[in-house]
Image: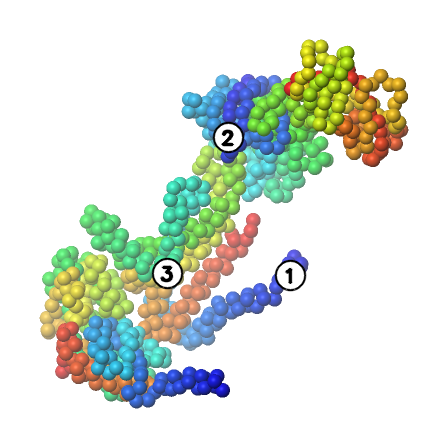
């Protein structure tokens, strides 16, 4: 008799995990672009404080890789890529999305290591032969945007000849410049965080040449924590905006 | 021989089958998921062939480098008793237990443009090692050196040192004895070491991508190409992975008969 | 041509001291029990293990001079070694093994192989030239090792237990060849063994080594006639009684040993009791009787059981568990005539004057 009761008690522990309303304990998984690492981590902390029954787990990475993971069936509740292209892919080729909303915009910048070993002063200098340029790989939004910018500046061919490494995500580009191995890299302006701003120098990209990246966020269809996921999205679009602004992201429109 | 077979315990047979399954099943999974209709396109694409060619060059160079550096090390560890021998042995094994990415970071700290040797190199000659094919070779050699030392040390210990004494009394100088007696007798262990190093170097990823970067034709070896493709085309990445497996198998099977069989 | 050696050689905790000379006109055998230090001396002479102290000089060339800090490495010594385990190179054929010393000294491949082939033929191994060491029989391998040591005409030839590992048949065959080669060899020859038969059949002079020391040097005849230590006496098959010498009666004395007493003729030079002394008795001087002898002049009559009989050619050595134990040497004919077998009860007798007494 005692054992049966104990067994029932154990079973009872599992019940709250099976979906249900926000008032029960849930954990949501958010797949977000690498450029959102710092901002979303802070938003996550604040969100958990505001909604004590929900825990947020983040997986940051290149948007193309994250989209592929979702298509392969990775259990994720929220997706926040650095480009609408990958949201579209999840919507049409994948499980589909709901509650989609644009929550931020970003622009890009050229960064060089402190000391500026290759004496880069403008975007055009990236075309100079011998410059060691690092970009995110083709397919990663930061990489695609960078190539678009080089095209806008009319130096795509020369600059691409200077590329010495295609990093898996934009944080890899930041790393290579921080370490002083690369002469220059093209990253999001928001990647120039306070703790690295002393070690790198920003070379502004003129507005006419720069691109504006739009970040959408949505709940992935089939998530078993839809209410909690939706709450997170509302938070990002609402109170989270202050945090995003503080990290340098532009408002969604 | 028959008596040996008879005495194999049943438990051993079961465990051996499990062991083989552990290795064979994931391989079967790969083969099953390969998109055979597209595989040919993926494998013959320019990026794949470039990655394959680069991988073979890098792996071979790294294996040779590991053996050239590893032999004197193995010699010292097995033949001389110098103070700190245990420390040296631990150091040599370190790349084996270190996460490869950490190994890459370590290599950067020495050979990177701001590393304590790399900076001197750059200031004096304007030469930067990162982002080059030699960097990929260095990264691969770093992780496979322990394997070379282990294989060669075992070999040197198994040699009867009196054979080398005898060769000396017969008039062989140290170099002559090394060339004509020691090395020929070590051929199986050298071959085993080469194969191990080559296989490890071929599959190296973390240290390469950290230290050498990722650029098609220069540093993007097959594992890096697989990883990049995995972001957007998992099935194609699987086809490419299978190529890696096939190349490794071909080398191992090809060499096995010739050198690894007992004298 | 000669070798002068005066060294202390050490290997681990063990040390052996040896001082002797060897001329090129003779084969010298280093004879001693296992662990006496013979192999250590070989290694020192070959240059593999430098001595702890002393000097080695060969034909005026200094091989080792510890006080002066000189040591000639093995590859520069004109020394050829045939090792106890032969140590043939397993990855080379017989002919390549034999050519090795020449190739190592820069001789061209063809010339080296041709010389090697000639030498192998001389040792009766022409058809085995291409065989690997693993395919050779014990006797063949021993001859290849000998050829390998001889081929570049060293001035000192060292043989470490050359016949020990061979079976009886191979031993006879190889012994003949070794003796022939040794006699034809122009330099100093040093042979190391624990087998007295091997030493006495191959060597002109013997150096006895026991417990890290040289105990006796002499020709086989000298050693046989006057062994200086119990080991040597045992070796050459002589009866040896060690104990305290006491006077017994006029002209006679008694050696008191733990195993029994032996009556001996009192040695002329001695006065009073003496301790210890050694009494030597040749086995041929021991007579055997099926019944206790009566009225014999022999002062020593001992009764015992035959513990073993061994044949050596036409003679038999009969061991008796008398007190003290004895070895008697009689003809095979006598053994058969008396029906002597293991377990037979016999009486052994010998005269007091036949025991030679010497101070240890």
How far apart marks 1 and 2 lie (CA) works out to 48 Å
Marks 3/1: CA distance?
Answer: 40 Å
The crowd level at tag 1 (other Cα within 10 Å; few <14, some 14-19, many 20+) is few
Mark 1 element type: loop
Q: Residues within 10 Å of mark 3 (few under 14, many from 20)?
A: many
Taking C301 as reference, is B240 left or right? left
For label 1, the residue is: B7
In the image: residue C347, left or right of residue A145: right
Q: Position of residue C351 (x, y in %)?
A: 80, 18
State which quarter of the image contains the C terminus of chain A.
bottom left
Q: CA distance from mark 3 to mark 2?
A: 51 Å
**Marks 3 and 2 close (CB-CB < 8 Å):** no
Q: Chain of mark 1?
A: B
Instruction: State the residue position of label 2.
Output: C10
Residue labelled with disc 3 = B204
Disc 2: host chain:
C
């Amino acid at each position: 008799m005692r054992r049966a009761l104990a067994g029932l008690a154990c079973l009872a522990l599992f019940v709250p995990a099976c979906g249900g309303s926000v008032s029960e304990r849930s954990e949501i998984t958010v797949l977000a672009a690498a450029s959102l690492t710092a901002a979303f981590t802070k938003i996550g902390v604040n969100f958990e404080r505001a909604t004590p029954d929900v825990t947020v787990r983040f997986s940051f990475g290149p948007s193309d890789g994250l989209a592929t993971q979702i298509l392969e069936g990775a259990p994720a509740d929220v997706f926040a890529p650095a480009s609408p292209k990958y949201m579209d892919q999840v919507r049409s080729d994948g499980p589909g999305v709901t509650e989609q909303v644009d929550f931020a915009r970003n622009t890009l910048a050229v960064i060089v290591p402190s000391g500026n070993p290759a004496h880069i002063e403008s975007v055009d200098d990236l075309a100079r032969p011998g410059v060691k340029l690092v970009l995110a790989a083709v397919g990663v939004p930061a990489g695609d945007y960078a190539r678009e910018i080089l095209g806008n500046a009319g130096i795509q061919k020369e600059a691409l000849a200077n590329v010495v490494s295609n990093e898996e995500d934009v944080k890899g580009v930041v790393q290579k410049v921080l370490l002083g191995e690369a002469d220059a890299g093209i990253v999001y302006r928001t990647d120039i965080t306070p703790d690295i701003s002393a070690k790198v120098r920003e070379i502004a990209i003129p507005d006419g040449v720069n691109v504006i990246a739009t970040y959408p966020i949505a709940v992935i269809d089939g998530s078993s924590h839809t209410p909690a996921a939706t709450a997170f999205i509302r938070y990002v679009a609402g109170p989270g905006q202050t945090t995003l602004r503080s990290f340098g992201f532009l408002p969604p429109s | 021989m028959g008596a040996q077979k008879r005495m194999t315990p049943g438990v051993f047979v079961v465990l051996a089958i499990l062991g083989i399954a552990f290795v064979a099943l994931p391989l079967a999974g790969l083969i099953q998921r390969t998109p055979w209709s597209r595989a040919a396109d993926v494998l013959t694409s320019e990026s794949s062939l470039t990655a394959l060619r680069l991988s073979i060059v890098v792996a071979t160079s790294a294996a040779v480098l590991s053996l050239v550096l590893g032999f004197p090390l193995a010699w010292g560890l097995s033949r001389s008793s110098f103070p700190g021998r245990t420390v040296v042995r631990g150091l040599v094994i370190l790349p084996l237990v270190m996460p490869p990415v950490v190994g890459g970071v370590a290599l950067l700290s020495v050979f990177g443009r701001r590393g304590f040797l790399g900076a001197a190199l750059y200031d004096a000659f304007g030469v930067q090692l990162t982002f080059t094919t030699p960097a990929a070779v260095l990264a691969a050699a770093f992780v496979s050196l322990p394997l070379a030392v282990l294989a060669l040390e075992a070999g040197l210990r198994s040699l009867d040192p009196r054979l080398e004494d005898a060769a000396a009394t017969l008039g062989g100088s140290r170099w002559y004895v090394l060339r004509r007696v020691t090395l020929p007798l070590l051929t199986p262990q050298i071959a085993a070491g080469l194969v191990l190093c080559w296989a490890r170097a071929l599959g190296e990823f973390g240290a390469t991508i950290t230290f050498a970067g990722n650029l098609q034709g220069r540093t993007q070896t097959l594992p890096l190409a697989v990883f990049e493709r995995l972001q957007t085309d998992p099935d194609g990445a699987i086809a490419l992975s299978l190529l890696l497996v096939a190349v490794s198998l071909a080398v191992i099977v090809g060499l096995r008969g010739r050198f690894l069989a007992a004298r | 041509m000669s070798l002068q050696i005066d060294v202390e050689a050490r290997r681990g905790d063990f040390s052996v001291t040896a001082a002797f000379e060897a001329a090129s006109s003779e084969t010298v055998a280093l004879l001693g029990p296992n662990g006496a230090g013979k192999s250590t001396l070989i290694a020192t002479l070959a240059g593999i293990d430098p001595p702890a102290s002393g000097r080695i000089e060969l034909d005026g060339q200094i091989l080792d001079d510890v006080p002066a800090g000189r040591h000639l490495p093995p590859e520069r010594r004109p020394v050829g070694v045939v090792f106890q385990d032969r140590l043939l190179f397993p990855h080379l054929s017989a002919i390549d093994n034999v050519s090795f010393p020449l190739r190592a000294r820069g001789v061209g491949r063809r010339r080296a192989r041709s010389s090697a082939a000639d030498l192998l033929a001389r040792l009766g191994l022409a058809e085995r030239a291409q065989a690997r060491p693993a395919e050779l029989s014990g006797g063949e391998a021993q001859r290849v090792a000998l050829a390998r040591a001889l081929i570049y005409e060293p001035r000192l030839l060292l043989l470490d237990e050359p016949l020990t590992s061979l079976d009886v048949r191979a031993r006879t065959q190889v012994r003949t060849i070794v003796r022939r080669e040794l006699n034809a060899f122009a330099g100093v020859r040093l042979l190391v063994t624990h087998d007295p038969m091997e030493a006495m059949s191959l060597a002109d002079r013997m150096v006895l080594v026991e417990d890290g020391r040289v105990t006796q040097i002499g020709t086989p005849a000298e050693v046989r006639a006057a062994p200086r230590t119990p080991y040597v006496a045992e070796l050459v098959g002589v009866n040896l009684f060690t104990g305290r010498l006491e006077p017994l009666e006029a002209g006679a004395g008694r050696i008191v040993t733990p195993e029994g007493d032996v009556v001996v003729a009192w040695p002329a030079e001695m006065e009073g009791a003496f301790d210890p002394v050694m009494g030597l008795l040749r086995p041929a001087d021991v007579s055997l009787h099926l019944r206790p002898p009566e009225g014999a002049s022999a002062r020593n009559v001992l009764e015992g059981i035959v513990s073993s009989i061994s044949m050596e050619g036409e003679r038999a050595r009969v061991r008796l568990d008398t007190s003290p134990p004895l070895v008697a040497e009689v003809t095979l004919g006598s053994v058969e005539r008396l029906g002597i077998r293991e377990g037979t009860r016999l009486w052994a007798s010998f005269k007091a004057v036949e025991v030679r007494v010497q101070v240890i």
